[in-house]
Image: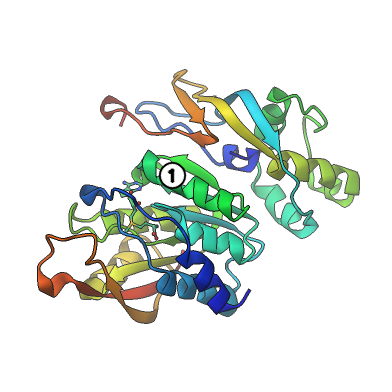
Amino acid sequence: MRLLTHNMLSSNVKGVVNGFPLRLEASSWVEKEVEFNADFLRSMFPKIDWPALAGAAQKIGYAALPDTADATMLESEDFLKKFHHALLEIHVEEGALVCPESGRRFPINKGIPNMLLNEDEV
Amino acid sequence: MKLKQLEGLLGNLEQFSDPKVELEQYPTGPHIASRLLYMAESMYGDVSGKVVADFGCGCGTLGIASTLLGAEHVIGFDIDSQSLEIASINAAELELDIDLILCDIKSLGPKGKFVDTVVMNPPFGTRKKGSDMEFLSVALKVAERAVYSLHKTTTREHVRRAALRDYNAKSAEILCQLRFDVPKIYKFHKKKEVDIAVDLWRFVP
Ligand SMILES: C[S@@+](CC[C@H](N)C(=O)[O-])C[C@H]1O[C@@H](n2cnc3c(N)ncnc32)[C@H](O)[C@@H]1O
């Protein structure tokens, strides 16, 4: 699971009002190079929840992203490179996503988060 | 990539080893799958450089086709972990990266428009009535540009009305009619059900 996907997922356990962002716990991850595409990054930026991305990146030891970001930063090549790396090149293999409100854990095995809910959670 | 080449690569993918009838697990054949994605890309530019979701991805055919046509990020969602494992192997064999999520499509949605395009071959709802419409309703909530989907031709007017009126689609257009062949897996099917007419739709959310 890439951090871009993490940015799109939320916990929908019954009764939870704000299930986003899911807290990332990662015990293993891999990095894979992806071709740099500045246009894609610029078009994605407004849709990304920045604190969620920066927070998740920090959890896997990538602390190069600023805590906050605004659109003017997209002119910096250096910023785009870091954004690119965090968004697309890190794959979480094992760990869990934790609902910020209920504490419900969604395990990640072999890169696949299990977001299935039990009957009493829907 | 040429259409023929895409179709060839999709033809080599591993498919459901032990299809679960209640989940309507039958693959989209390489002929239909390659044309669906090829049209989405060449006629509408909905794939290359985009974020694409494959709803009910099964063994990953449509998601993998999206990646092969240049999608920047692809996420496959399915409720069955065994299919996702096959999807993961299929992607790895082609050295492609797609993200996979084990979940029920019905529990997605509230997070808003998080992808550009949704591609899907939803359960037709022969086992669980209305599942294709549930998929469509969620797809139109999460897609920003377009939803590509296959539905039985017999449900055409219902699909159009629901999309436009209930799910607020801006447009609902049939790109072509196809024959979908489900027989080899579903031995219990009566003869007349063997070859189903389906419409390939493009919806604009
Ligand atoms: C007709 S198959 C299509 C498979 C694959 N997309 C393809 O094109 O080859 C439908 C898929 O939807 C999945 N499915 C059924 N109900 C689901 C649900 N509620 N949520 C997520 N996936 C579901 C099944 O496991 C199956 O893989």
The residue located at (75%, 54%) in the rendering is A42
Drawn side of residue B73 relative to residue B185, left or right: right
**In the image, the residue with mark 1 has its CB under 8 Å from the nearest atom of ligand 1:** no
Q: Residue furthest left?
A: B190
Q: Chain of mark 1?
A: B
- Residue B105 pos. (x, y %): 37, 46
Number of marks in the rendered image: 1
Where residue B1 appears, as percent x and y from the top left, is: 63, 73
Instruction: Determine whether B194 is above or below B167 in the image.
Output: below
Position of residue B133 relative to residue A118, above or below, is below
Kind of element beneath mark 1: helix
Q: Is residue B171 visible?
A: no
Residue B48 position within the rendered picture, expressed as x and y whole percent measured from the top left: 64, 66
- The quarter of the picture where residue B67 lies is bottom right
Q: Point out the image quarter for the N terminus of chain A.
A: top right
Q: Is residue B37 visible?
A: yes
Please report the residue visible at 51 percent of the width from the left and 57 percent of the height from the top: B63
Rendered position, B191 above or below A16: below
Q: Residue at x 77, y 33 (%)?
A: A68
For this view, does A45 lie left or right of residue B148? right
Seen at 55% across and 52% down, the residue is B91
Along the viewing direction, whichever of A99 and B35 lies nearer the viewer:
B35
Between B11 and B99, the one nearer to me in the picture: B11
